[in-house]
């Protein structure tokens, strides 16, 4: 499969948007270029006593609207172009959701599955030591991303506090007030360590809010009425969904869409996909599929229809086959460059909800737009994660602890407002949702430059 350079893709997306705006060359350059690029090489002691050198990055793209915000990913294919693209997209996401933060992203070139837990902890702490002077509650606020977890955020936070306390109070113990302030530097932490309720599900939940808002816009028959809630009408329509990727984001988007009454008919992980036998009638149960996968170690035997997991309920297919199934909604929730010029012409879905970052190449984007397929762009669809990360940051700063109900209601409000702004711009420009999303974001960023 053709692999598009993610940063080149990001710049192409930017170019399409700025054609609709009257920007100076200086403003365009500030949008194109990161404000700071950090590349580090740091040693980690392995369990066998050897010392291994790891390569890491932190890209701080734009701080016009506030501190840099963005995850840290541990992946063997992490490189500078990927991190630059992700930092750029984070700038756009924060602006679309109208939160007072800018875009950043970090990564370490490593396969964490090959590390022991002790090695993973030492790696996490060493990475923080390498970038400690460039992050902080008012400077750059990292969070989890691919292959990083709340536990890893805890290790990183502890290490950062240790480093800063030595600098600020070399001869005395750090005060609780100072410690509390330093803890704000990371989000996505465990709940008992300053984390926010609802963060784990936030990206998937936010994507479901956006999709339901889109469906309500597309057809008046989906509009909720007092005597027939939206979810009941969705059940009657029996819209079908295929989700590529069954990690945190893929599972939760599948779960929330299933809960809303849509029929999830296909799911996949990195090793393959499963699909129901009868696309017109059956649906998978994401909760049971997850439980079955944990028990059996593979999805290939987890055809969980309703409340029953039965090998006769479906069949195995490839990830490539999942993408071109005749479903209403396709959700790429895995990695970049999944929908390309090679397979875009075969996409049969009416809506593509981008829950992964950069799953559609620019060439494929053009083809889908010409086919009349609505693509809900990643910078809108998956921005629920950074939105609740912002909520955590805000709770920490104010020493507050929101209920899960408040987190989810505030997330719903933010996502629906973001969708409404993008849809209005799309109608105004007669453009794709992606171009409209970028125009909305760029206007807000330039206003603060």
Image (cartoon, helix red, strand yellow):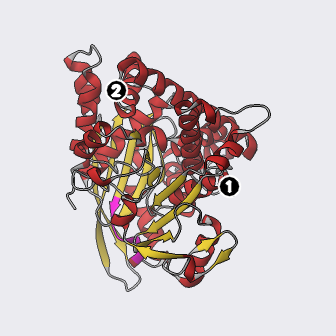
Residue 156 visible? The answer is: no
83 relative to 115 in the view: left or right = left
The residue under the point 36% across, 58% down is 324
Assess disc 1: are there few (<14), some (14-19) or many (≥20) residues with their C-alpha within 10 Å of its C-alpha. some
Q: Which mark is residue 191?
A: 1
Q: Quadrant of the C terminus?
A: top left
Which sits in the foreground, 66 or 422?
Answer: 422
Which sits in the foreground, 106 or 420?
Answer: 420
212 relative to 110 in the view: left or right = right
The residue under the point 40% across, 30% down is 437
Which region shows up in magenta? 108-113
The residue under the point 41% across, 24% down is 426
Disc on the earlier residue, 2 or 1: 1
Under circle 1, the secondary element is helix
User: Cα distance, mark 2 to mark 1?
Assistant: 41 Å
Q: Which mark is residue 431?
A: 2
Q: Which mark is residue 32?
A: none
Query: Picture coordinates of residue 70 (x, y %)?
Result: 44, 45
Query: Picture coordinates of residue 81 (x, y %)?
Result: 24, 49
What is the number of callouts on the image?
A: 2
* Residue 308 vertical placement versus 15 (above, below): below
Question: Nearer the viewer's eye, disc 2 or disc 1?
Answer: 2
* Residue 241 vertical placement versus 211 (above, below): below
């Amino acid at each position: 499969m053709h692999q598009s350079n993610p940063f080149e893709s990001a710049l192409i997306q930017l170019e399409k948007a700025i054609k609709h705006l009257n920007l100076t060359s200086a403003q365009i350059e500030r949008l194109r270029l990161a404000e700071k690029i950090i590349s580090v090489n740091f040693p980690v002691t392995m369990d066998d006593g050897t010392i291994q050198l790891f390569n890491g990055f932190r890209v701080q793209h734009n701080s016009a609207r506030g501190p840099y915000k963005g995850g840290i990913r541990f992946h063997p294919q992490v490189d500078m172009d990927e991190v630059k693209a992700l930092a750029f997209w984070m700038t756009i996401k924060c602006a679309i959701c109208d939160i007072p933060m800018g875009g950043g992203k970090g990564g370490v070139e490593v396969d964490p599955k090959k590390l022991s837990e002790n090695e993973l902890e030492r790696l996490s702490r060493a990475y923080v030591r390498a970038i400690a002077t460039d992050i902080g509650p008012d400077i750059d606020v990292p969070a989890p991303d691919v292959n990083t977890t709340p536990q890893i955020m805890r290790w990183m936070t502890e290490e950062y506090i240790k480093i800063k306390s030595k600098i600020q109070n070399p001869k005395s113990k750090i005060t609780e007030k100072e410690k509390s302030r330093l803890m704000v530097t990371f989000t996505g932490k465990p709940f008992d360590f300053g984390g926010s309720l609802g963060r784990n599900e936030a990206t998937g939940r936010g994507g479901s809010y956006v999709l339901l808002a889109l469906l309500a816009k597309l057809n008046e028959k989906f509009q909720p009425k007092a005597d027939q809630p939206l979810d009941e009408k969705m059940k009657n329509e029996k819209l079908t969904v295929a989700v590529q990727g069954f990690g945190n984001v893929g599972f939760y988007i599948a779960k929330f869409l299933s809960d809303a009454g849509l029929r999830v008919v296909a799911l996949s992980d990195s090793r393959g996909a499963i699909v129901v036998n009868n696309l017109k009638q059956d649906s998978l149960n994401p909760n049971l599929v997850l439980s079955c996968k944990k028990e059996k170690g593979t999805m290939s035997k987890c055809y969980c229809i309703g409340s029953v997991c039965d090998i006769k309920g479906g069949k195995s297919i490839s990830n490539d086959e999942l993408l071109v199934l005749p479903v209403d909604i396709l959700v790429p929730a895995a990695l970049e460059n999944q929908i390309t010029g090679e397979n875009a012409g075969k996409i049969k879905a009416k809506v593509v909800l981008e829950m992964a970052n950069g799953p559609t190449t620019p060439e494929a984007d053009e083809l889908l737009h010409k086919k009349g397929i609505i693509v809900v762009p990643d910078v809108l669809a998956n921005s629920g994660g950074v939105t609740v990360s912002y909520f955590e940051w805000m709770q920490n700063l104010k020493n507050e602890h929101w209920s899960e109900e408040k987190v989810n209601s505030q997330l719903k409000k933010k996502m629906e407002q973001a969708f409404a702004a993008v849809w209005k711009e799309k109608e105004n420009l007669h453009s794709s949702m992606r171009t409209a999303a970028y125009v909305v974001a760029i206007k807000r960023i330039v206003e603060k430059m």
